[in-house]
Amino acid sequence: MILECIALLILSVLGIWLTYWFLRVWHFERYLKGIPHPPLIPLVGNAMEFASSITILSTVMKYHRKYKGNFKIYVGSQPFLFFSETKDIAFILTSTTMLRKSDPYRFLHNWLGTGLLTSWGDKWRKHRKIITPAFHFQILEESVDVFNSAGNILITKLTEESKKGSIDVYPFVARCTLDIICETAMGTTVDAQNDPNSQYMDSVNVLLGVLVDRTLSPLLGNDLLYRFSRTYQREQQALKVVHGYSKSVINKKMEEFERTRVKEESSVDNLGIKKKKALLDLLLEYAAKDPAFNFEDICQEVDTFMFEGHDTTATSISFALFSLAANPEVQETAFAEQKEIFITDMQRPAAFEDLKKMLYLKMVIMESLRTYTTIPVYARAIDEVVDWNDVLIPKHTVVNLNAYALHHDPNVYPNPEKFDPERFNSDTLGTNNPFVFVPFSAGPRNCIGQKFAMLQMQCILSIILRSFEIRPAVPEHKIIFRTEAVLKSDNGVVVKLVKRH
């Protein structure tokens, strides 16, 4: 009798769940029936095909090709639209109402709170305005010293490691970019390059892994169930380290700020030279003027800057190195440009003016960002009905902008599988459309630090290119994509580095 009751209860729950699923899918299909989708499995939709971070990108591209552009999938009863045409991407990215990031971004809230990446509405607009001065021309110029210093340490580490043969460059570059972003964001360093077992670095990697785990697992994605998981415990331990470090630095900076802000000369050093300002200094200055911008806001924006400015840049630099190794003629042209700029002193630090002259290297970086689109998909949550090409997209739909497909569209980029930096030559580009190349997104929510990121990539790649010839790995290395917060290589980014001098 008890077993019969349990069985009946289970069947009733399944029946209710199935009915809810059908009704919700039917509701969305009334609006979206004109957009094709793969066959659905009751209750799970197409979720099973997206359960592995290794196959997400290939599955998205499979349906992009099958449906010749735009399509949709269902994860459970939640519709996800995928747009890849320039006009559709422009429509979404220029919208002043579709500014909220999609639901998986809430998995970052424990780490980043509601900083610039995860907030929307009035808070996002206010914080964007506050942080914009952190990327002023003068501050970007001052950051080059930090790039050079960290880059020189990177060369020392790569020189030693390259003696062993072909190497995975990503871990070394990642520690370098972490040192850079820490110093530019907080005015200090975690010294990750000299301490490969850095607790801070390990904790950041744990948090990045948690984001992937929660995105791919329905159980971990449920906030209530998640709190009972081992993943939650790992996240909490990592957060203690990451938040503890940033808060200790912020508290120390706040004490220094209070001691010095009353002195008129506090913005210059003993020689009368203006002191460099980190993002944290600018946030503290604003907080002094606006008490509503509190300690928690400062912490969230510093943590956000650390997150956004570390992993994405490291991945982009690593893929650029892989591209240079695979295309020796491109590398030779890039190296020739370096020789023209540095002439007889190839070891001197790059100045800001030097970076402005590296036009071909910038084209190499842009072509690498096109080929290996670091953020392959941008997701937006629809909070009100949107009229798109006479199709009404209902509330609670997620719209994904398929940047990877756009960047590999032969109608936009002829022969897209060929690595050709000349595509981005200003004389041959042939278009000023900002929505055909979107590695940093575009529109109101574009990446606020894109100029900083480009300068950093140019400087670090310049240092490496002047120090090493970059060759393909032995044996040959083929990248296996893994989709996390950014597009990565599951098996590393392996090349062979040969010292030039």
Image (spheres, rainbow, N blue to C red):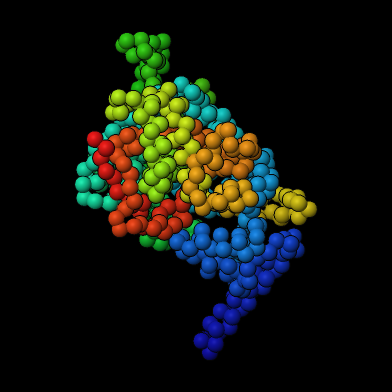
Q: Is residue 475 visible?
A: yes
Horizontally, is 249 left or right of 304 in the view?
Answer: left
Q: Quadrant of residue 305?
A: top left
Q: Position of residue 292 (x, y in %)?
A: 53, 29
Image quadrant occupied by the C terminus: top left
Q: Residue at x 68, y 48 (%)?
A: 88
Q: Quadrant of residue 143?
A: top left
Q: Is residue 26 above or below residue 278?
A: below
Name the residue: 28% across, 33% down. Answer: 152
- Image spot of residue 182 (x, y percent): 36, 35
Q: Is residue 359 above or below residue 226?
A: above
Q: Position of residue 191 (x, y in %)?
A: 28, 37
**Residue 4 image offset from top left, x and y in percent:** 55, 87
Q: Is residue 436 left or right of residue 278?
A: right
Seen in the picture, residue 463 relative to 213 is either above or below; the reply is above
Q: How many labels, in total?
A: 0
- The residue closer to the viewer here, 84 or 368, is 368
Residue lying furthest right in this view? 390
Q: Name the residue located 46 percent from the left edge and 21 percent from the top edge.
A: 138
Towards the viewer: 66 or 28: 66
**Residue sitting at 29 percent across and 48 percent down?**
496
- Is residue 226 in view? no
